[in-house]
Image (cartoon, rainbow, N blue to C red):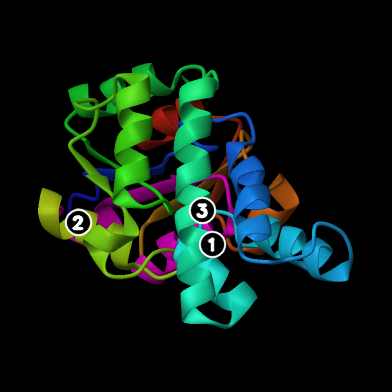
Amino acid sequence: MPDTTIQLAVLDMAGTTVADGGLVLRAFEEAATAAGIPADGPQRDHARTYVLDTMGQSKIAVFRALLGDEDKAQQANRAFETAYDALIDDSDIAPIPGAADAIRSLRSAGVKVALTTGFSRGTQDRLLNALGWTDIADLTLAPSDAGRGRPYPDLVLTALLHLGADAVDRVAVLGDTTSDIATGLAAGARIVAGTLTGAHDADALRAAGATHIVPSVSEFADLVLN
């Protein structure tokens, strides 16, 4: 029989391996104000709901969908990144409990690990530096590194190409949002797991097509290695 051992684990960051204390929503509020969305009323309520529903997707894509204007979307995205970067400095960014050990366990067992995000490359680097994680994974990817962000398969497939996995069915994906699940499924990964440490609950993750639901990244590592 062919070897079907998982060779590559593609892990989301905020909500999956990183606890950011809701900084995405706080930064969004500042970005929405900068983009001219009224602070109260149906337009702001719709925007908040959309941001929650699309958690994990590339932020510039979210602002394009919300604002329908490229200049306003770029302005909002810049405001989001500025706000999030400032909040990183003022907040207790921390790994999800057990995340670092899980990543080390996977790599020690010969599984390559890629950390992915919907943030810009610069914001991702700020997060990695704040955590002391600049060398924890084999690869880190932002949407700009791959072509398109979630829910497209580009991040997972770019990780596969860079890290040399033999086939998509040798890949396992973990995320806390329905967008993470969509990405993993679109890429053809064999394991597309949802974790309960972030934005979306088990029902939403199952409805999106998750192959497994795990309490946290620690159990995901056990799933991949056992």
Q: Give the number of the disc on residue 160.
A: 2
Q: Which residue is mark 1?
A: 76
Amino acid type, mark 3: Ala
Amino acid type, mark 1: Ala
Which label lies toward us, 2 or 1? Answer: 1
Residue at 36 percent of width and 52 percent of height: 120
Q: Quadrant of the C terminus?
A: top left
Residue 143: within the magenta? no
Quadrant assignment, res 166 = bottom left
Residue at 61 percent of width and 76 percent of height: 67
Quadrant assignment, res 129 = top left
* Vertical arrangement, residue 181 with respect to residue 26, above or below: below
Looking at the image, the residue that sits furthest to the bottom is 68
**How far across and down, in percent of the image, does residue 215 sit?**
61, 31
Q: CA distance from mark 3 to mark 2?
A: 32 Å
Q: Give the number of the disc on residue 79.
A: 3
Seen in the image, is 216 located left or right of residue 49?
A: left
Seen in the image, is 158 located left or right of residue 155?
A: left
Q: Check if mark 1's residue and mark 3's residue have beta carbons within 8 Å.
A: yes
Which circle's residue, 3 or 2, is located before the other in the chain? 3
Segment tinted magenta in the rendering: 165-187
Which is more toward the observer, 142 or 79? 79
Look at the numbered disc 3 and give the secondary structure of its residue.
helix
**How far across and down, in percent of the image, does residue 58 sit?**
45, 61
Residue 173: within the magenta? yes
Look at the numbered disc 1 and give the secondary structure of its residue.
helix
